[in-house]
Image (cartoon, rainbow, N blue to C red):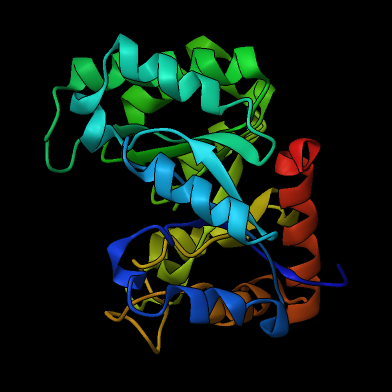
Amino acid sequence: MENMIFDTHAHYDDEAFDEDRDELLSSFPDNRIGWVIDAASTVKSHEDILKLTEKYPFIYGTVGVHPDEVGSLDDEVFARLEKLCDLPKTVAVGEVGLDYHWNIEEKSKQIYWFERFIDLAKRKELPLIIHSREAASDTLEVLKSSDAGKIGAVMHCYSYSKEIAKVLLNEGFYFGIGGVATFKNARKLIETIEYLPMSSILLETDCPYLAPVPYRGKRNCSLYIPYVVEKISQLKNISEEEVIRITAQNALRLFGKVM
């Protein structure tokens, strides 16, 4: 597909899209949205994502549970999720990781399931989509001890410093960049984007969350990615077409072996 946008992290299974989901998704091909990865975040979301991947040829799914939701996991549930990794349109394990912001789940429990999902990704030879919020030290420790970079991984909605990005870049990680890049208070992220090579950047929405300016605070969707493209274009001093082309190539390199 000629220079189409690749949204590497979305949640179109979310109830925020219940009223107009089909109308919105059907508009994507005519608006240069070529690929969308709908990232699993709860146990229930897997069933809804499967339906989306069956209905829309450009939507792909993942297997994973957000760290705030790991209390719903046990060995039986995990075994069911493991089987979903073998579906033809499952392209990654994620979103999985650590989130210490709300402390909804015990840190030890989050780390346990994070390590289980990394092991699953290794066994199934799938890349990782990693969620990490206010948990940089533990996240780095788990990732380094598991050699997660070797199987391919993206730090979804990257929010840490340029210094931490250097460490992850050396391990071969990709970085998911979305609407936050357009926020006025995004100085730390701007510095990171300026530092990162284009070959490590992926586009994402995390919709329905984190809509870019001028839609900040409203429901996000893939149609707003051009605002993120524009920002990256300005920061990297390359054309918007180049941003779209390179980030799509990056995404296909990471996820493409199962597409």
Residue 200 visible in image: yes
Q: Residue at x 51, y 45 (%)?
A: 50
Q: Residue at x 36, y 71 (%)?
A: 17
Left or right: 257 as drawn, with respect to 214 = right
Residue 138, image quadrant: top left
Residue 36, image quadrant: bottom right
Residue 162 is situated, as x and y percent measured from the top left of the image, at 49, 48
Rendered-image quadrant of the C terminus = top right
Taking depth in this image into account, of 7 and 203 the one nearest to the observer is 7
Residue 152 is situated, as x and y percent measured from the top left of the image, at 66, 30
Q: Residue at x 72, y 40 (%)?
A: 254
Left or right: 123 as drawn, with respect to 10 = right
How many numbered marks appear? Answer: 0
Residue 80 is situated, as x and y percent measured from the top left of the image, at 42, 20
Taking depth in this image into account, of 113 and 30 the one nearest to the observer is 30
Left or right: 196 as drawn, with respect to 34 = left
Residue 239 visible in image: no
Does 127 sit above or below residue 4?
above
Residue 34 is situated, as x and y percent measured from the top left of the image, at 72, 67
Does 190 sit above or below residue 254?
below
Extreme-right residue of the structure: 2
Does 244 sit above or below residue 170?
below
